[in-house]
Image: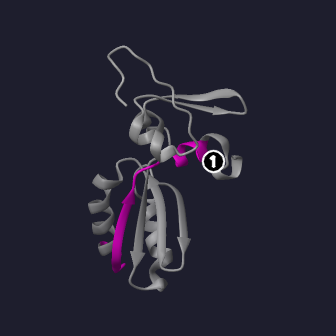
Amino acid sequence: MRAEQGTTVVLTTHYLDEADAAADRVVVVDHGEVIADGTPDQLKGKVSGDLVTVELADVADASAAAGVAARMPGAQDIERADDIVRFRVAGGDTVTPEVVRAMDSAGVRLRGTRVQRPTLDDVFLTLTGRSLRDAA
């Protein structure tokens, strides 16, 4: 379905990946109240950064890796779980090379890294404190 110029199509959905792909503008409603309004990218930008995951070659390096993550400018929500360290940071794709260099300098051997951009599900969770699946 293609709307003509100047036409507004309203789609209500609980499938936020569908809204992300199809919508120019997203309005988040919670308990009948508008709690957010903007483009999908604007809303995702309100989440505190990309999720950077660092997989360690040795679980013994987890403490040192978490310390390196904490020193990254703007790093937030640092979590350790066995041989994984996760944290949020703005521009995760551009920070990752710096993270790898800092880990190497600290003697932390890596198995891999991954960067995940926020999703509209992350936006909903940030705004409401629960996932949409919990809210339904």
Q: Going by the image, does 23 lie left or right of 130?
A: left
Q: Is residue 48 in view?
A: no
Callout count: 1
Position of 8 relative to 70 (above/below): above
Is residue 114 covered in magenta?
yes
Residue at image mark 1: 132
Q: In this figure, which colouring scheme has been used for the structure? A: one colour
Q: Quadrant of residue 126?
A: top right
- Residue 134 picture location, percent across and down: 69, 52
Which of the pair 31/98 is nearer the observer?
Answer: 31
- Residue 107 picture location, percent across and down: 34, 79
Position of 14 relative to 103 (above/below): above
Position of 110 relative to 125 (above/below): below
Residue type marked 1: Leu
**Is label 1 in a helix, a strand or a loop?**
helix
- Residue 61 picture location, percent across and down: 45, 81
Q: Going by the image, does 32 lie left or right of 75?
A: right
Residue at 56% x, 33% y is 12
Q: Quadrant of residue 112?
A: bottom left
Which of the pair 125/12 is nearer the observer?
Answer: 12
Is residue 125 covered in magenta?
yes
Residue at 61% x, 40% y is 127
Residue at 65% x, 52% y is 133
Position of 64 relative to 25 (above/below): below
Q: Is residue 42 in view?
A: yes
User: Around disc 1, counting alpha carbons within 10 Å, would you say few (fewer than 14), some (14 to 19), or many (20 or more)?
Assistant: some
Which residues fall within the magenta stretch? 105-126
Q: Residue furthest top?
A: 6
Which of the pair 129/33 is nearer the observer?
Answer: 33
